[in-house]
Amino acid sequence: MKRTALILVSVLVLALMSACATTPTPVPATPVPATAAPPQVSATAAATKAASATTVPTVPAAPATKAPTAPQGTLKHAHAIAPSSFNPHQSQVLLMGTYYQMVYETLIAVGKDGKLAPQLATEWQITSKAITFKLRQGVVFHDGTPFNAQAVVTNLNDVKSGTPAPLKADLASVVSVEALDEMTVRLNLSDFDPALMISLSRFAGMMVSPTALKTADKIPVGTGPWAYNAQDSKTDTKYVFDFFLKYWEPSQAGVARVEIYPILDLAARVNGLQSGEVDSANIGVLATRQQLEAKGFKGVAEVGAGGFAVHIFDRQGTQVKALADKRVRQALAMSIDRVAYFKTLGIGVPSVQPFPAGYTGNAKDLMDLSYNPTRAKALMTEAGVSNLELNVPSGAAVLPTNQALGGFFAPLGVNLKISTIAPGTIAPECASGKWAVAWCPITEGHPKTFVENRLLKNGIYNPFKVENPRIEELYAKAKNLPDEQGADLWGQIIKIAVEEGNILFIGNECGNCTVVSPKVQGAESRYGVDVGYLVRGVTVVK
Amino acid sequence: MLKYGLTRLAATVPLLLAMSVLVFLVATIMPGGIAVVLLGDNASPETVTVLEAQLGLNDPLPVQYARWLGNALQGNLGDSWTLKEPVVGVIVRRMPVTLSLAVGGMLIGIILGLMLGIIAGLRPGSGVDRLITLIASIGVAMPAFWLAMLLAVYFAVQLRWFPAIGYTPLGEDPVKWLRSITLPCIALGLPTAALIVRQMRSSFITVLQSRYILAAHATGIPLWQVVSRYALRNALVPVVTVIGFRLAVVFSLSLAVEQVFNLPGIASITIRSVMMRDIPLLQGTVLLTALFVVVTNLLIDLSYGWLNPRVRLA
């Protein structure tokens, strides 16, 4: 008996001891934040307020007025995904933007007013065949490599020719990139592409240190306010970013350190936030967000870079005859109570069109497609449709939304049958041609790509190849015009698409919704900026 | 005994092989695909094709499997598609967390279960016995993940006695390590204890009614000596079986518990590999889990011989 007990206890103790071994922390070669004092940069900023197909003078922006303050404190963020690649040129995953914004900067940024603003490029000139950027002086990558025209050439070529190059289409109009001098770079274009500037403000325009491109998958090296700290990070568990002392505009960084914890489970993120172990967390469920707000936490990122919308693919009635009637599609649009949806389920702002007021693509003088059940029923009666069955694909994440849509459509005699699909497959399903109607994601930042993908005959999300000659005609006119000249045409296209019930929009939903603790100050989101909430400028009070 | 052990060990090889085929097939027929995960929802078909070719997914399934098996036999489980590092390294790094939970949970379960089981078994039908049986019944019905959530909300979020998320390695800070695994271990240990209590109680009552125990009593040996010297050892045989099964179950229950407490163990990486369609990682972790269950069962079988020599002779 004693021997048995001894053996059992020994085995358990040995197992416990082996279990208690320290988890090894990988320490790859990494750039370390520099220790030298930050240089005072007084670059002349410029913004494109006007552009023409010929030559565009740049407009200097007002110098920064915020007094530089030393970053202090640590911001701890619980994120819904672990990084799959730190190379922004190899990903289109929206939630990765949270990681990228620490380390990387783009040539141009999107300002609070939705207009393009300088970042690594201080001024630019646009012609029909080229965009010439003047680059910011005194910027260095975290590994000490100077930021210059050659770095831009290397980066943009990487976007275009890397493998598998998921962002290649964003730079489709760029024929070549050349360094004119140390701090001037020119993008030679096949045709002017109004969406190109938006693309350069997103992942495709993020600058990776040319000397670190090969390893950027695992170790990010950019010019941003925070440098990746591989020593303190633990793969898949904790990612640490420390303020980069040579950063060109120290006042932009509010905190000295940012720690991102990938936490896949929503309940664990909520617990972490409530226990004070993290200061902010991805919370994409409205009910949870409201509970947290009731406890003093603050929800940010109400308006995201895209969202979802009901796409009516079968507008010629190939699969579902009734959908060929515009009145049926309009009735469906009017049956959606958008306000109720955002009070009970969605996080965002109700809208019948994809682009908010003030942004290119916003349609003026739209017919009233807001919630009107009486008018919707009347339209169905006019169309002679009383019973309609629509089959839609749905992953678990959007199941509540599809169920809500089913509830909105039911009074019209429309039965929404929901078919379960595997997680992460909604976009390919939307493009597959199997579904007459589907609730699909929208990620385009500019109406040009939105129209190309969803409304043109050969658009990837127009699987029934429905052609609208008026849209094709307007697109042909607008596609090479700068926004200042093309905005009205894009608005007209969106107006047609919305009024004809091609896409039933519900509102601008956030794709990277965040809740912050009361200790976090200055957290804000921005439409069209796909990084979730902006960590720059955020401070954490003790 | 050695021959018996080796025979049982050899029998696990075809089992593991069958398991690897099954896991491979399940993983490859999962809809969605790694390309969408890595490239995003709006990846063009052209880009998806390039990535799939890079990952060798265009080869026929038997070729893919043979390649994986060939490497696995040499100890190379491939590279994780999402973590971009060898699967073996990921498993080795995460193993201490899962073992901490499994061993800690089992320790709590065994100590508590044996103690309460003996107390209840000594006085069957008494008030103490009924109370323990009632608590054990509730414990059996209580899912570990639910218990984990309750513990997290009350002891971590409200009282802040323990961390709600994260793990600290023992070598980094022993106190923090203990605090980080206490609630998860309790969540795993209490349902285990409930099972062991019921088994121990029942087994103990049966043994105490045996003639040799009555004879020992009759000779005037004190109760504690009868219990420790004669009754306990024989009563433990069926309990060890339960403990063995439970060890495998605790390993799988840690899937949920690791998620609730965001612990970077094997279980959470397995969930991640399923969600992200990371097939090499999934194969590696499932293979390891299968190996763990097989070896545990083998050890349990062998322990019967130590506990009861009649089993060895048979």
Image (cartoon, coloured by chain):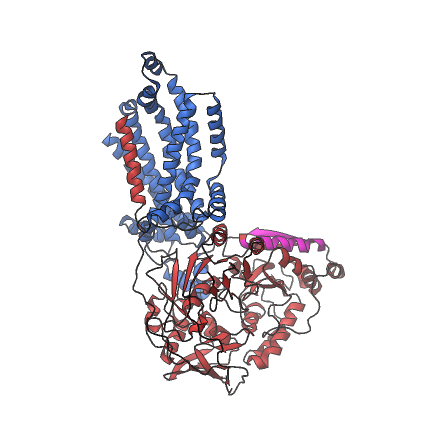
Chain colours: A red, B blue
Q: Nearer the viewer, residue A360 or A226?
A: A226
Q: Nearer the viewer, residue A536 or A336?
A: A536
Residue A378 percent location from the top left of the image: 76, 60
Q: Nearer the viewer, residue A506 or A317?
A: A506
Q: Quadrant of residue A149?
A: bottom left
Q: Which residue occupies the extreme top position in the image?
A: B218
Task: Give the left or right position of residue B39, taking residue B217 as reference.
Answer: right
Vertical order, A191 against B176 (above or below): below
Task: Give the left or right position of residue A503, taking residue B292 as reference.
Answer: right
Residue A160 percent location from the top left of the image: 41, 73
Residue A375 percent location from the top left of the image: 75, 61
- Please say whether residue A104 is visible from this viewpoint: yes
- In the picture, the quarter occupied by the N terminus of chain A is top left
Q: Nearer the viewer, residue A343 or A430?
A: A343
Task: Give the left or right position of residue A486, taking residue B221 as reference.
Answer: right
Vertical order, A522 against A13 (above or below): below
- Total residue callouts: 0
Residue A293 percent location from the top left of the image: 57, 56
Q: Which residue occupies the extreme front position in the image?
A: A542
- Please say whether residue B43 is visible from this viewpoint: no
Magenta stretch contains residue A407:
yes
Q: Quadrant of residue A157?
A: bottom left
Magenta stretch contains residue A54:
no
Q: Quadrant of residue A237?
A: bottom left
Per the rendered image, the range of residues in magenta is: A397-423
